[in-house]
Image (cartoon, coloured by chain):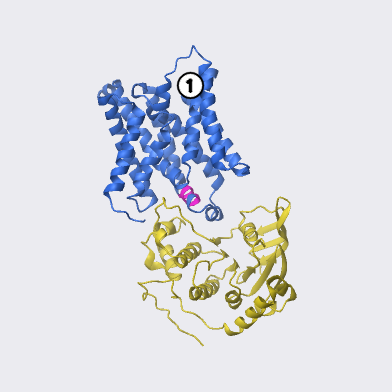
Chain colours: A yellow, B blue
Amino acid sequence: MSEPLVSLENLTVAFDDRPAVDHVNLSVHRGDIITIIGPNGAGKTTLIKAVLGIQKPTSGKVSLNRSLVIGYVPQHLTLESTLPLSVERFMQLSGRSAGECEAALDRTGVKHLLKASVHHLSGGEKQRLLLARALARKPDLLVLDEPAQGVDINGQASLYELIRQLRDELNCGVIMISHDLHLVMAATDKVICLNQHICCSGHPADISHDPAFIETFGHQVAESVAVYHHHHNHRHDLHGDVVSGTAGSHGECDHAHH
Amino acid sequence: MPIIDSLLDDFFWRALIGGLGVALVAGPLGCFVVWRRMAYFGDTLAHSALLGIALSFLIQVPLNVGVILTCVVLAVVLVFFSRTRTLATDTLLGILAHSALAIGLVTLSFMPDVRVDLTGLLFGDLLAMSRADLLWIYGGAALILLLLVSLWRGLLMSTIHSELARVEGVQVERLRLVLVLMFSLVIAVAMKIVGVLLITALLIIPAATARRLARNPEQMAGLAVIFGFIAVTGGLSLSWYLDTPAGPSVVVTAFATFLLIYGGTPQQQT
């Protein structure tokens, strides 16, 4: 197995002596899609902030491969209304060339919004813009904090599918937080159930039977995940409701519903 | 050049040239004040300038130096305290702003042999601009513009999304410090024109006016400079012809421009 892109050894982050992340061991390799799930306040965001290097560990170690390029997709892009900003300018601020920026926007399906103001974008369009911004950096590691927030249910499925495709194209590692249990299960290799410590982890198909998972999320969720996972092997096209009006410039409408 | 030399002999032209220099940097810096919601922060620094003046008399240093040093110390204290979060930021700023102003006034009253034109310091004075002041203004403006241009992308990114900026390698904390140091500098040099009580207005109003018309951050900064020029030129002319106080006249002109732009242009959400 290759060198991990990032590895956490016994990572603990405590706020006022209360651990938000407790002795977590984790490594991400190229090609991995690792999804962190867990109840509110489980330390998911704290964990990925430690991975990103913007949260200092209280103890333990975060080792990042040197010269690693990280693409980060934050939970929100809340822009002050006083700050005028077009999609194009926001992309340029990544420091990448105009060509790279446009290609990235094209890949996430929002190239037609190039001249639009960021203030006008819907939740789904903003997520795709943030993803394009991360993509333009040609990341080795893609870190996403609830990428499907504010995206409708069709859009969510296609967004997760897009993330899976990007993993293949960039051969990068992916680590993400998600609440959309049943959707995540279809497009992930490894699920980590976090509740301060890692309470269980493994392949999505197995984890829903794990007693620790059932204890954290309850029988109902565990069953619905298991059931939903069974059905969820079809693909959605990239459109969803996210791309509005001027759609049609995209040629990838493979309606492969089984 | 003799023409410039004779211009600089005239106190009105000195004030105008100085004011334009201030507006040149107040435009882009004011945008950051607006974007980062630092209006109250700017006010606090400006109010501490009076304390800086009192201290300058006390320890016998040039006024500009005393003001810059006081602002810098206060700025660093504020940045440090806002991290600890025991007090809400606006409470902390309120305490420091008014305390600094009050301590400055009290200290000055203890120095009866020091004659200072308090009204001039608080509200600006058309007559007060010396050739040395012009050097300070244009030296400071050159430094600030140089910093702004070279750090623009990082400053803007950390304003848009500080965590994203940090992941992309922007030194967010360091830039925040550089930004407040630039504020300190601009306050020290703008004091002579508009006075300590009105400096924040010169930062905010042109930037807010520019927001109405701008589609991009850089456009907004550029337009803010232009609206700053208009405010300074109009205000100082007003002061010259009608014998009104310089600072308030500049602010009134800026406010009139603001009303005109917001009243006269269609709203565009950009």
Residue A67 occupies quadrant: bottom right
User: In the image, residue A194 lies at what x, y percent?
Assistant: 68, 66
The answer to which of A255 and B151 lies nearer the viewer is: A255
Q: Amino acid at mark 1?
A: Pro
For the image shown, how many numbered marks are present on the structure? 1
- Disc 1: host chain: B
- Identify the residue position indicated by label 1 in the image: B62
Residue at image point 72% right, 62% down: A24
B108 magenta-colored: no
B154 magenta-colored: yes
The answer to which of B245 and A243 lies nearer the viewer is: B245
With A48 as the anchor, is B221 left or right in this view?
left
At numbered mark 1, what does the secondary structure look like: helix, strand or loop?
loop
With A9 as the anchor, is B143 left or right in this view?
left
User: In the image, residue B71 lies at what x, y percent?
Assistant: 51, 31
Say if residue A127 shows up in the picture: yes
Residue at image point 40% right, 30% down: B137
Residue at image point 43% right, 32% down: B140
Outermost residue to the bottom = A258
Say if residue A3 shows up in the picture: no
**What kind of secondary structure does the magenta stretch mostly adopt?**
helix
Q: Which residues are magenta?
A: B153-158
Pointer 1 local density, CA inside 10 Å: few below 14, some 14–19, many at least 20:
few
User: In the image, residue B199 lies at what x, y percent?
Assistant: 42, 33
**A22 versus B3 height, above or below:** below
The answer to which of B100 and A48 lies nearer the viewer is: B100
The quarter of the picture where the N terminus of chain A appears is bottom right
